[in-house]
Image: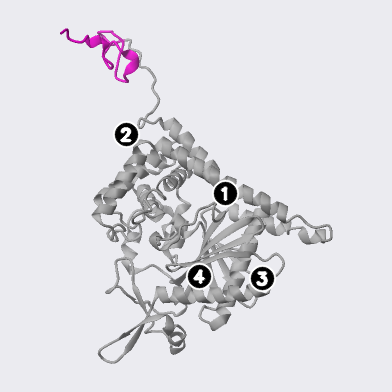
Amino acid sequence: MAAPVVASRAGSVNSVGNSPTATPNNPNNNNKIIPSYPELDFRSGARIEELNKLIQEFSKHDQREYDDQRALEIHTAKDFIFSMLGMVQKLDQKLPVANEYLLLSGGVREGVVDMDLDELNVYARGTDFDLDFTLLVPALKLHDRNQPVTLDMRHSALCHSWLSLRLFDESTINKWKDCCTIVDHINGATNYFFSPTLVADWFYESISVVLLEVQKKPQRGMPKVEKVEKNGTVISVILGVGSSRMLYDIVPVVSFKGWPAVAQSWLMENHFWDAGKRRTSGVCRSPRSEVQLKKCISSSLMQAYQACKALIIKLLSRPKAISPYHLRSMMLWSCDRLPANYLSQDDFSAHFLLGLIDDLQHCLVNKVCPNYFIPQCNMLEHMSDETTMLHARKLSSVRSDPAEHLRTAIERAKAANRLTLDLQRRGSVASLPSPQSDPGDQQPDDRLAKKLQQLVTENPGKSISVFINPDDVTRPHFRIDDKFF
């Protein structure tokens, strides 16, 4: 049998057009012509340019755009939630009278805070809601006491702590002891430890009582309460306002001032946000720190993060969820690891997406994902080897064909938008004024809508706090970073 002709093989020197390493048949190679090839992803063979275009398309369909009517509906829902919390405070005086809430864009399922997603019911944009928010409500404000706070971490997992009320006054202890775990010591002393589960139970019951009372006397224009559920320590409220459905994930929290000692070393190391270290180090909670850090992240990396989150959020939700918060931590670590001028490249979204997938797969294979603020906390430590390897295998299917998975994410985003638009059209028809109604009653407050739209759309990623007086909930005061409105 004759041997095959070498010149006819793909990749040989005579097959110039078939291989990026091929050259014309010139022994001196002095005048060789190097053909131009598109930039490819080595693992999947996908064109980087195509991936960039798909990420851009996904961002276009995934972004939220607010017109004046939607902005007014957002304001109406926010006012209703704050009024409800004012009524909760009046029930038993547990919540602080003058409170400071932290309002975050995106629900807890989006990874805006570190929560166990296995405790949460599954809600989907388009099917269950159109816009989602997380509202952190301090049940205790420890920085009002002017004394150090001791966190008892001897009996809790890493990154978790017991909070003793031992140093609080009798009135505070009596107010909250039904929401505490009671520990009796050998010397006869009784210690009360704040219980997140019991606090969430009390909060859910109080909100349910208030909403039941409010719905007995409905007022014109009042949002419709479509769902109230307790998911672990989160109370999820879905409101129907006009043609929009708003999901509020309300989380009772403890408000601190300063920085926990367990995370103190993090502040001493070099980070990508070093220019703003002094400003960031004084924040009272890590969610507010993350809001500050988000402003330092390039738009191309943020687009890659949002696209990556859409690819994995359902794929890796069972048997034990990989949270978007894991991905957020890896993104922050990448900002520390890589040069800022590299991460700021506008046309590198595809590289960032592939890198985030690679990083996540590396974390799963090694079962190590350090918390960005507390690196000694491994957020995958609780997972079994079988679960992490199962997730790693699922993720390998995404990495082998990222373009196809991006197309699927785009179609899901389009479908969610179609559902939202369909409901908006139905709502617009249902809300048309009758001939007997006063046309003036149907006119929204354009100035209020435009002001709210400006606050929401022009301050992406900023820390928005709201100061509420429960005796006059009609006059909230907004703080965006250090500015008051």
Element marked by disc 3: loop
- Between the residue at mark 3 and the residue at mark 1, the CA separation in whole angstroms equals 27 Å
- Between the residue at mark 4 and the residue at mark 3, the CA separation in whole angstroms equals 18 Å
The first of marks 3 and 1 along the sequence is: 1
For residue 346, say whether it is visible: no
Residue type at tag 3: Thr
Q: Which residue is mark 1?
A: 64
The first of marks 4 and 1 along the sequence is: 1
- Between the residue at mark 2 and the residue at mark 3, the CA separation in whole angstroms equals 57 Å
Residue type at tag 2: Arg
**Compared with residue 348, is residue 18 higher up or lower down, i.e. above or below?**
above
**Nearer-the-camera pick, 18 or 294:** 18
For residue 44, say whether it is visible: yes
Q: Residue at x 38, y 77 (%)?
A: 148
**Is residue 5 in the magenta section?**
yes
Element marked by disc 2: loop
Q: Which residue is mark 2?
A: 43
What numbered label is drawn on residue 176? Answer: none
377 sits to left or right of 130: left
**Nearer-the-camera pick, 172 or 389:** 389
Circle 4 residues within 10 Å: few <14, some 14–19, many ≥20: many
The image position of residue 469, as x and y in percent, is 60, 75
Most common SS among magenta residues: loop
Q: Are marks 4 and 3 in contact (CB under 8 Å)?
A: no
Q: Residue at x 38, y 53 (%)?
A: 317
The first of marks 1 and 2 along the sequence is: 2
Q: Which residue is mark 3?
A: 474
Q: Residue at x 51, y 54 (%)?
A: 461
- Between the residue at mark 1 and the residue at mark 2, the CA separation in whole angstroms equals 33 Å
Residue type at tag 4: Val
Q: Which residue is mark 4?
A: 137
Circle 1 residues within 10 Å: few <14, some 14–19, many ≥20: few
